[in-house]
Image: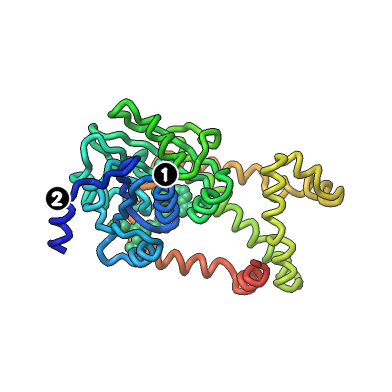
Amino acid sequence: MALSCYYIRFMPPAKTKNGVVAVLGYGSQGKAIAANLRDSGYEVVIGLKSRSRSRVRAKRDGFRRIYTAREATRLASYVCIALPDHLHGRIYKQDIEKNLNPGSTLIFLHGFSVHFGFVAPPKNCDVIMIAPLAPGLAVREKYLSDRSLSAFWAVHQDYTGRSSRTTHALAAAMGFKRNRLVKTSFADEAVGDLFGEQAVLCGGLSELILSGFEVLVERGLPAENAYLEVAYQLDLIISLIKQYGIEGMFERISVTARYGSALAGKKIIDRSVKKRMGLLYEEIRAGKFARKLNRLTPQDIQALRKLVKERTSRPFEKAAKKYSK
Ligand SMILES: NC(=O)c1ccc[n+]([C@@H]2O[C@H](COP(=O)([O-])OP(=O)(O)OC[C@H]3O[C@@H](n4cnc5c(N)ncnc54)[C@H](OP(=O)(O)O)[C@@H]3O)[C@@H](O)[C@H]2O)c1
């Protein structure tokens, strides 16, 4: 350990075309972004806890320069925070703040910790955001195929006067084409992303699906049939919406489906839902959710896993697994 610290302190940053990027964290996004940046010509060093389980995966993926977050930060001109949001504040204070090189760039993948004030970067660095609109697996897959994924970008602090250019260069190297980048602010991305995932994409949608599933099963349909009716075709409907809009989707389903859905939709998702969504938005905007998330402990995360398991049902999960291929 002592030897590796000595080595790092006196080893000059590697000479590469683009500079050294420290990717801190090697989870969903870290793994994808580290691989994409490396394939785009950046020298990538990984920052992880000395006993992190992610070290094995990073090594298996061919990364040789794996350090602690502190050591990796010292080596880099760009520091990408691919860490769980609720830990940003603590890890930033402990490992990053004192080791950041002046003039370096802090890259966030979500506006959360900066916008809600858990991380307060020093004045002498650029602070940018490149927030992928997809899980890490897709970020890597799309980099290797058609690079058709979108991402939000924003500059929070422009110390060097070059941060927009830096953001575009890094985003391109991560696999996001210029015409797929959407300019925003840390504030809008932080609040919008939390609201979108909680109210619609993950929270709202899973409750909608499970409620439909339960209604059918409680009235005697086999669980497998119920799954096929309320969940199995979702990706096809979503892809119609993404391609043609909601109006276009309605035009492409049967008259039966169109007539029934147009009448029933508003009965199920009525005005009270929108009102509760508004309240949820206000809680998120005011930082109430952020403060709660920031206090999460490993025990809370375990309890959360149990809660999710209790809410869903084994027959649903079994059917999902059966039809997943
Ligand atoms: N996941 C997504 O779909 C998605 C999409 C867009 C943006 N983002 C953003 O991307 C960022 C990363 O999220 P993620 O979902 O990729 O995270 P994640 O999958 O939970 O991965 C977290 C990584 O951080 C490591 N880590 C934990 N504590 C650490 C410490 N003290 N020092 C160094 N490394 C540590 C973990 O290693 P261990 O193995 O040791 O636990 C793991 O490799 C977040 O800001 C998130 O909002 C995520």
**Left or right: where 135 falls relative to 86:** right
**Left or right: where 141 falls relative to 121:** right
* Label annotation for residue 221: none
Circle 2 packing at 10 Å, graded few (<14), some (14-19), many (20+), is few
Q: Is residue 287 visible?
A: yes
Look at the numbered disc 1 and say if its residue's Cβ is closer than 8 Å to ligand 1. yes
Local secondary structure at mark 2? helix
Q: Foreground residue, 76 or 240?
A: 76
Residue shown at 25%/48% (left/top)?
73
Q: Residue furthest top?
A: 161
Nearest to the eye among marks 2 and 1: give it: 2
Residue shown at 64%/68% (left/top)?
320
Q: Position of residue 305 (x, y in %)?
A: 46, 66
Q: Is residue 284 visible?
A: no
Look at the numbered disc 2 and say if its residue's Cβ is closer than 8 Å to ligand 1. no
Local secondary structure at mark 1? loop
Q: Position of residue 21 (x, y in %)?
A: 32, 46
Chosen colour scheme: rainbow
Q: CA distance from mark 2 to mark 1?
A: 33 Å
Q: Position of residue 96 (x, y in %)?
A: 24, 47
* Label annotation for residue 110: 1
Residue shown at 14%/50% (left/top)?
10
Residue shown at 71%/51% (left/top)?
237
* Label annotation for residue 10: 2
> Height in image: 72 above or below 54?
above
> Height in image: 29 above or below 61?
above
Circle 1 packing at 10 Å, graded few (<14), some (14-19), many (20+), is many
Give the residue type at disc 1: His
Quarter of the picture containing the C terminus is bottom right
